[in-house]
Image: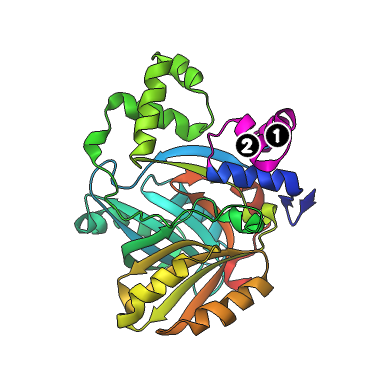
Amino acid sequence: MIQDGYATLDELDRRIVVALQHDGRATWRAIAHAVGASTATVARRGQALLSSGLVKIAVTPALGSRGPVDPFLVRINCRPGSQIDVAAALAEHPDVRFVTLVTGRYDIVAELVVPGGAARYPQLIADLQSIEGVERWRSDLILHVHKLAFDWGRQLFEQQMDQPPAPRDDTPPAVDPTAFDAADWRIIDHLEHDGRETFQGVADHLGMNESSVRRRFERLRASGAINILTLVPAPALGMGAETLLTISIEPRHIAEVARELAQHPAVRYLASILDQSALFCEVILPSTDHLYRFIGESLSNMRGVTGWEASMELLYLKRGFVQTPWWRRQAVRVPAAREA
């Protein structure tokens, strides 16, 4: 069914997607067991979701895999009518990790990962700030990532599922760059385009042995050197309130608030930023009513929180260095961000 430009999924499809968020390379048999349906039905539905472009699985290297990096949170104002073009240009840049159109004070929020560290930031942004349509550019160093959750959809079925895993720390450098060799990079580059490609398929394409591909992949995965992303638009899962919050906190309470927020199932991303003694937080919730309760019952009652600035996310063009396959179809439906 199509609603507001997105295909909305029935409960079985949603369960399949949530299982893929937990492990995007799980076999259809394993996913069928997890969701309580036949393997044939799950395989048919899962393949249809992937073929439609509504869901994409990608394997990407963890931060720090190519050497030291420093990530920056970037907030941009654009000339009216140019928001999509600016966001599209940013999404094409290999060092941009995520890009989203938003409401509120800014038009675009993005994360720029600077290879070699913060000292190289001025060189990197010279071209980006000259993108046609950029009027104002604000940068903030990301000091520490407290939570990066890939399976945020679990909250839909949290009463029927086991407790989610502990929040992972994704602060760069996350891995030793020497953990990769040329063959590893060839495997990862191939799986970025199709994260569910079989090991035999990867081996055939790269001219390698299947057992070698499997062994290398499992080694990198076990060490945390790679991420398996399942990209899906939140509205397709019935999650209608994607929100970015910059939360002001008394300095002595930052760690305490970060620990408390990281335990909330709606929090997908949480990081300390350099400016304003603040946390940058992304929450994904079913509705604005749920968002109201999150703010009124959770956030506002946390000791040390002094205020926040919020923006609704209109359209994600890129997550985890991977462009979302649906953004071009949805772009024509997104209003100018500051007019939304």
Q: Residue at x 19, y 58 (%)?
A: 119
Nearest to the observer: residue 264 or residue 267: 264
Residue type at mark 2 is: Ile
Q: In the picture provided, is 227 more to the left or to the right than 177?
A: right
Alpha carbons under labels 2 and 1: distance apart: 7 Å
Q: Which mark is residue 225?
A: none
Q: Is residue 9 visible?
A: no
Give the vertical position of 178 relative to 282 (above or below).
Answer: above
User: Which residue does the image show at 35% across and 54% down from the upper left?
Assistant: 170
Residue on which the image places disc 1: 42
Mark closest to the chain's N terminus, 2 or 1: 2
- Image-based side of 103 in relation to 288, left or right: left
Q: In the figure, residue 143 lies in which quadrant?
A: bottom left
Relative depth, front residue between 14 and 4 = 14
Q: Position of residue 240 (x, y in %)?
A: 67, 63
Residue pictured at 63% horizontal, 44% vertical: 17
Query: Which stretch appears magenta?
Result: 23-51
Q: Main secondary structure of the magenta part?
A: helix
Q: Does 287 sit left or right of 170 as displayed?
A: right
> Answer yes or no: do the residues labelled 2 and 1 have beta carbons within 8 Å?
yes
Q: Which residue is under mark 2?
A: 31
At 46% from the left and 70% from the top, the residue drawn is 261
Residue 100 on image: x %, y %: 52, 58
Local SS, label 1: helix
250 displayed left or right of 51: left
Farthest residue, direction right: 1
